[in-house]
Image: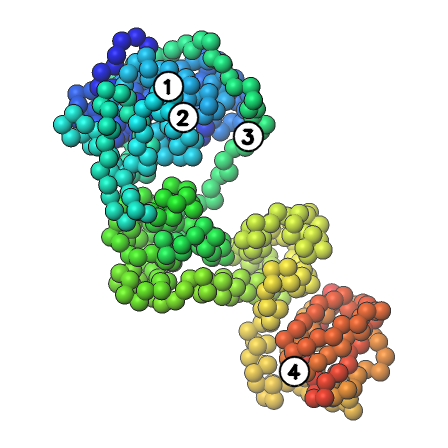
Amino acid sequence: MGNNAGAEIWVFGDLRSKRLFGFCLNVLAKARQLAGSMSGKTAVVLMGSSADVQRDSACGLQAYVSVSSAAEECIAHGADYVYILDNENLVIPRADTYAAVLANAVLRRGPTLVLFPLTDFGRELAARSARIGNAGLIAQCMDLKVEGDRVVAKCHSWDGEIMADITFSDRSKTGFATVQPNAFQAVDCQGEHGVIKWIRVDHLDVPERLNLLSSLAEPDKQQQLEDAKVVVVGGAGLHSHDNFSLVRELAAALGGEVGATRPPVFQHWVEEERLIGQTGKTVQPRLLFSIGTSGAVQYTAGIMEAKTIVAINRDKNSPIFQVADLGIVGDAKTFLPLLISKIKQEAVRKMADVIQGDVKADKGNGFGKRVRNLRELQNWTQETLAQATGETPEFIEKVERDEIAPPVGFLLRLAGALKVDAGTFLRKEEKTMIRNLRAQAFVKRTQNYSYQTLSPGAESDHIRAFMVTIEPKQAHKPVAYKHEGEEFIFVMEGDLRLTLGSKTHNLKSGESIHFNSDIPHKLKSISNEPTRCLVVLYTP
């Protein structure tokens, strides 16, 4: 690569996807500022092959950004040079191979500084390259500036509680740094003229003990964090990666996006692109949950446009409560599982209401999407959900596409798989009837039992609900009976024995069971007090 580059600042360009390449353009904007402060030049380093088409065919993907188009983009965003290191073994990104090539290029050219967007691949590549060159590496820089003849980086320290100024001890060597890409914005510099140089890399030895087995394109995001209507943000107060998973569960249950403050990003509980605040992203959702966050101004600057902010923190004096519309003083580890459970129950109840009504009329409200959200909340595939509910994957796919209306039995089995209270499936009107039975229920009595119709006027509907009371130690009916459809029983008081075919099930108060009602069955109270049961019948 010829003579010493003097005050040249390099930026590594990641071509694995447009999003990752966009990070490179963000960092390039900062490199241009630094180069301007030292009368230097900027260069973007790309890796690939002159036979550009080989990248797609070798990897089996179309997500990669081509070397040639990336080079033009870099020039359009202000790069003075684009160095394309050319070798057929650089088509597939590997940190070990890239590091060897990059370290050799640095040794020959001698730039002042090499910047890497802060990604998992960028971290590894920077560390390997610095180690090969026996050079200094400053990790996770939030900003960089030139002071005299030094490059000084600002980095979070002490779990993000303070900002530290860090520089390189040996200014005679090239410095390496990983940089938070969301801290900067790419700058369009159309009209400026840069130079693209193809540099052939010969005699590249690829390590033989590592082999790429497969690679997958990054899935398309359903929505961007900045555009989300619901955002759930986790902070340092969650204390661990496991606790932070509650933030993900709540976001999935609400159909929202996950955000984070600096400490969870610093601890690698969540990717950098989820950072919210002055050095991250600004969001403007209708609803924002801020969980375990202190309320530092660096963070709240990114959430002030939210319509409603709900804060959850153990410290009642936390500054986050000063910007929240609703504050909950409590332990998130205790509160969030309860909240998530209630939200899941409400989601399933709405689906039950739709099934009892008209699924087609609800297409705009996303009945199938609700099923998919519940499935994805559990990290289940369609095959897993099918197995849990006794259906086929094809059936689940049709439900999620709103092509068919599933029977209520599907929701009952779904509730069992999700550990959701089966009372979720009662309509609001039915719940009101239960609270005011004498006023609204038709009562039929026999010698051993009585039942109350909780859905009067629904005799011709597919689903009906009853309150059955069986006298102590008495049977519901003298012989087993059966009928077409499905049945759900919830024991409200006493102890119940259900004989289902040849099997016997003893249920206590608060327990429930769902079964195909075409199997002969009968009920009996086995307690010394009357046994009261909520019975829901579904008939095709």
Q: What residue is pinned by disc 4?
A: 493
Cα separation, mark 3 vs mark 2, equals 22 Å
Residue 269 rendering spot, x and y as whole percentages: 43, 46
Cα separation, mark 4 vs mark 2, equals 67 Å
Q: Which is more toward the observer, 23 or 482?
A: 23
Q: Is residue 201 above or below residue 157?
A: above
The kind of residue tagged 3 is Ser
Mark earlier in primary sequence (1, 4)? 1
Q: What residue is pinned by disc 3?
A: 215
On the picture, is 537 further left or further right than 43?
right
On the picture, is 249 further left or further right than 452?
left
Observer able to see residue 70:
no
Label 2, residues with CA under 10 Å away: few <14, some 14-19, many ≥20: many
Mark earlier in primary sequence (3, 2)? 2
Circles 3, 2 touching at the beta carbon (< 8 Å): no
Q: Is residue 135 above or below residue 402?
A: above
Q: Quadrant of the N terminus?
A: top left
Residue 53 rendering spot, x and y as whole percentages: 50, 17
The circle on residue 103 is 1
Mark earlier in primary sequence (3, 1)? 1
